[in-house]
Amino acid sequence: MAKVIIVGCGIAGPVLALLLKQKGFDPVVYERGPRAPDAGLSLMLQSNGLKVLDLIPGLVDRLPGRAIEQTRLFSILPSDLRLLAQSESVTEKGKVSKMGVNRPKLLALLSDVLEEHGIPVHFDTAVIDVELSLADDVVVHLSNGTIDSAPLVIGCDGLHSAVRKSLFGEQKPVFTGLTQTGGVTTNAFPGIPPTMHNFYGDNLHVIAYPISDSGDYSWAITERGPEAKETWRAMDQEAQNAFKTGPFSSLPLGVGQLLEKAQKITKYGLYDRPALSSWHQGRVLLIGDAAHPTSPHLGQGANQAFEDVSLLSNLLDASDLSLATLSSAFSSFEAERMTRTAELVNAAREAGELRVVAGEEAARQRNEKISASRREWGGIPAA
Ligand SMILES: Cc1cc2nc3c(=O)[nH]c(=O)nc-3n(C[C@H](O)[C@H](O)[C@H](O)COP(=O)(O)OP(=O)(O)OC[C@H]3O[C@@H](n4cnc5c(N)ncnc54)[C@H](O)[C@@H]3O)c2cc1C
Ligand SMILES: *[C@@H]1O[C@H](CO)[C@@H](O)[C@H](O)[C@H]1NC(C)=O
């Protein structure tokens, strides 16, 4: 049997397990957290990521989210209050091109689908070390003191990847200087089609998009500020109430109202890492955030993880797990993915900087740039 150990049952891990199972592998997944974590808010799936999820029969129809029909960019500078640009989402042959999803519900769905496909997932079990040997099997050490082994191990264990640490030593994620405070608001923006909103202010950007058929919107305010760890745990109720009535509650164009009914208000720092020159050693490979974490301003974190998953499952062959064949598959993977992901990490950083431009005059100039560059978007002139 072509056993593969997948470390992490977040976004990349379960989808990789499903695609490798389709290709005749025998995946086993280890996840540090519980089966249905409540942590985290939402993800934005774009056409590249949705195309990968479509490789799993029936999955896209079950996604806990909402197709997005239009994007609107606004200025919320008090002296420059206006719509900067607007576009319709492009749909290819009736397929959704953008969808906001509820992350905890997506994880619950993926766990169900793994079970339906008979793929074992060990929750509450962290991988604490990976023993690199060039012999036939890699040994992974688990948090309960036991070990497991397989000829192939894929690290899908996210920003603080333990597999990455075993391969390349400890390197701390890089705080980008930006934080987000996000939450979920029910019945936000009633009466309009499901819309991705971007509000540009002074050292301030707000994104809000729908994540359910019942009108739940996920939103996040980006600011430059002191480091805040990304524990993905909501603030306590007192802090949430203070935030709801704080300075953001008076923001115009419906942003203030988003806070009134908000739940799960969560603050987190935004991190990335410098590009590595290799993502593998021996029979072990990193993908997703473990390999190339990014700040979220292009909405590509999860989608790039899915691109990784799709390419990797195409490159691997369950009938040949020799070290030479794996090395060559990993090298092809890196050749195709490293430049693209590094470019996106850098572009996301730049997009983030644009979002937190500070000072009235600089922010007005930034708005002008956005409205000029987006004017042709979807052929709809900006106001
Ligand atoms: C709890 C949580 C909540 C998040 N919420 C959001 C959000 O609201 N918005 C957003 O944009 N992004 C969020 N993210 C990040 C986002 O999911 C990723 O940036 C992106 O989807 C890439 O997916 P990934 O599978 O590479 O990494 P992740 O989605 O981070 O998945 C990694 C998984 O590996 C597990 N893991 C970590 N270490 C170990 C270990 N040693 N052994 C076993 N398992 C391990 C983690 O528990 C996690 O389930 C969140 C991440 C986490 C972990
Ligand atoms: C350790 O964890 C693994 C995976 O969850 C499980 O299969 C095994 O029985 C556990 N062993 C002990 C001794 O708890």
Image (tube, grey):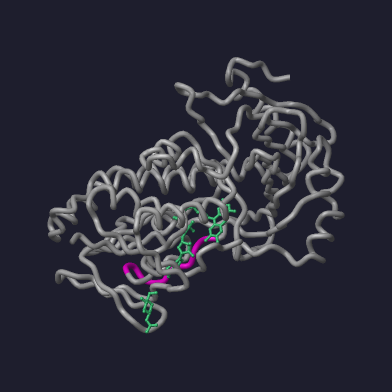
Check if residue 53 falls in the magenta segment.
Answer: no
On screen, residue 292 above or below 57: below
Number of marks in picture? 0
Residue occupying image coordinates x 52% and y 43%: 63
163 left or right of 80 in image? left
On screen, residue 246 above or below 172: above
On screen, residue 321 above or below 88: below
**Which residues are the magenta region?**
167-174
Quarter that holds the C terminus = top right
Residue occupying image coordinates x 73% and y 28%: 192
Kindly report the secondary structure that dominates the magenta region of the rendered protein.
loop
Residue 317: give x, y in percent of width and height. Answer: 18, 50
236 left or right of 19 in image? right
Quarter that holds the N terminus = bottom left
Residue 53: give x, y in percent of width and height. Answer: 42, 41
Residue 163: give x, y in percent of width and height. Answer: 36, 67
On screen, residue 98 above or below 358: above
The quadrant holding residue 55 is top left
Residue occupying image coordinates x 51% and y 55%: 107
The quadrant holding residue 324 is bottom left
Furthest-bottom residue in view?
A: 145
Q: Work out whether residue 12 or residue 56 is closer to the camera in this orientation and state it.
A: 56
Q: Work out whether residue 256 or residue 45 is closer to the camera in this orientation and state it.
A: 45
234 left or right of 291 in image? right
Q: Work out whether residue 233 or residue 280 is closer to the camera in this orientation and state it.
A: 233
